[in-house]
Amino acid sequence: MRLGAHMPTRGGVWRALERGVQLGCEVVQLFVKNNMQWFGRPFGPSDLAHYANALAGASFSAVFGHTGYLINLAAPPSANRDKSIKSLIQEIQLAGSLGLPFLVLHPGAHLGHGEQHGLRQIAAALDEVLAATRDHPVRIALENTAGQGTCLGHRLEHLAEIYQRVSRPGRLGICLDTAHLFAAGYDLRQPGTWDAVVEEVDRLVGRDQILVVHLNDSKTPLGSRVDRHAHIGQGHLGREAFRPLLNDPRFADTPGCLETPKSPDLHEDAENLATLRSLIDPPSPKPRPRPSDAGAPARRSRKAASASDPAGKPRRSRRRTAS
Ligand SMILES: [Zn+2]
Ligand SMILES: [Zn+2]
C-alpha cells in the first residue's frame, strides 16, 4: 500500500501537499472546501498556481479528496437534499479544477425512511450529480460506514446496490475504512477476514473498484456501530490487524490513508505512519544481484517519516479529521 494521511488545508489548499511532503506521505487526502459548510469559494488563479507548484515539487502516488460532512444524498425530498446535491456538484467541480481523480463520499443516512428508500434516494441523487458534472469526470468513492444511527453503507451490499442503481457506475469507486468495517461487525483481527472482505467486494462490484483504504484503529468495539477513530495499535483493532492489508500484494499501489486524531504539528501522523511501515514485511530474500545491478535503488528503501514531537511542546486540542 502507498501510505499517507488526511492533511489539513489550513492556509491554502496547497498547504496540504506541503504538509504531506514534510511527513513523508506517499498519498494525501484533503478537503476541497470547509467540510462543515455547504459551499466553498472556487479556487482562484493564485490558489491553483500554488497547488500546481506544490504538486510538481512532490512525488505523491495519489492525491484525492473527501467530501464535506453535511451532504446526505439518502435524505427524503427536502431543502437539505437539494443542498446536498448542489454541494456535491460544487465539490466535484473544485476537485476537477485540482485534477483529483476521486472524492470519498459517505453514502448518507435514511433518517428513518428505511434502507431501501435511502438507497434509491442515493442513486437518484448521484445520477443528478454525475449528469451535471460530465465535464469534470471525478469519480465518487463510496465509503463503507460504521452504521451509526441510520447511516447506510455499513454493509458492503449497500455500496453494491448503489452501483446497480446508478446510470453511470463507471464514475463510482469504493473506499474501505478499517475502523468502520470493524465497528460494523467485520472482525479484521481474525485471520482471513480481510481476504473475505476483498472477495466480497470482488464478487459484488470488482476488486479493482477499491480506490483507497482508510487506515484507522477503532476506539469502539466490534459491531458497536459507533464511529470513533483511534491511533494505529491504540484501539480495539490493534496493530496486528493491519498486517494483512499492508502486505497484500493486490493492493501494493493502492492508497492507504490515515484519518486519525491529530494536533497542529501533526506528530501523531508521523508516529502512525512509522507504526504502519514497521508492519510491512521485509522483502523476501532475492538472489544476489549481478554486478550490473549494483547501485540500483532497492524497493521500499523509503525511510519512515521520523518527525518527532518537539520536546515539551504542549499538545493542543485534537480535532477530528475525515472519518
Ligand atoms: Zn474513513
Ligand atoms: Zn469518511
Image (spheres, grey):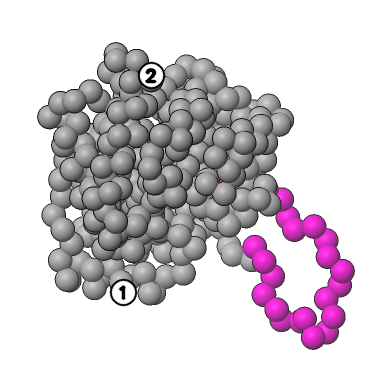
- Taking the spot 33% from the left edge, 63% from the top edge, the residue there is 99
- Above or below 173: residue 57: below
State the quadrant of the C terminus. Answer: top left
Residue linked to disc 1: 53
Q: Is residue 253 magenta?
A: no
Give percent across and percent down for residue 102: 39, 52
- Above or below 97: residue 224: above
Q: Main secondary structure of the magenta part?
A: loop
Give percent across and percent down for residue 83: 16, 37
Q: Nearest the camera: 107 or 11?
A: 107
Q: Residues within 10 Å of mark 1 (few under 14, many from 20)?
A: few
N-terminal of the pair, mark 1 or mark 2, is 1
Q: Residues within 10 Å of mark 2 (few under 14, many from 20)?
A: some
Circle number at residue 115: 2
Q: Is residue 276 magenta?
A: yes
Q: Nearest the camera: 248 or 282?
A: 248
Seen in the image, is 307 located left or right of residue 275?
Answer: left
For the question of whether residue 216 can be seen, the reply is no
Q: Amino acid at mark 2?
A: Glu
Give percent across and percent down for residue 20: 40, 59
Q: Amino acid at mark 1?
A: Asn
Circle number at residue 262: none
- Taking the spot 79% from the left edge, 86% from the top edge, the residue there is 292
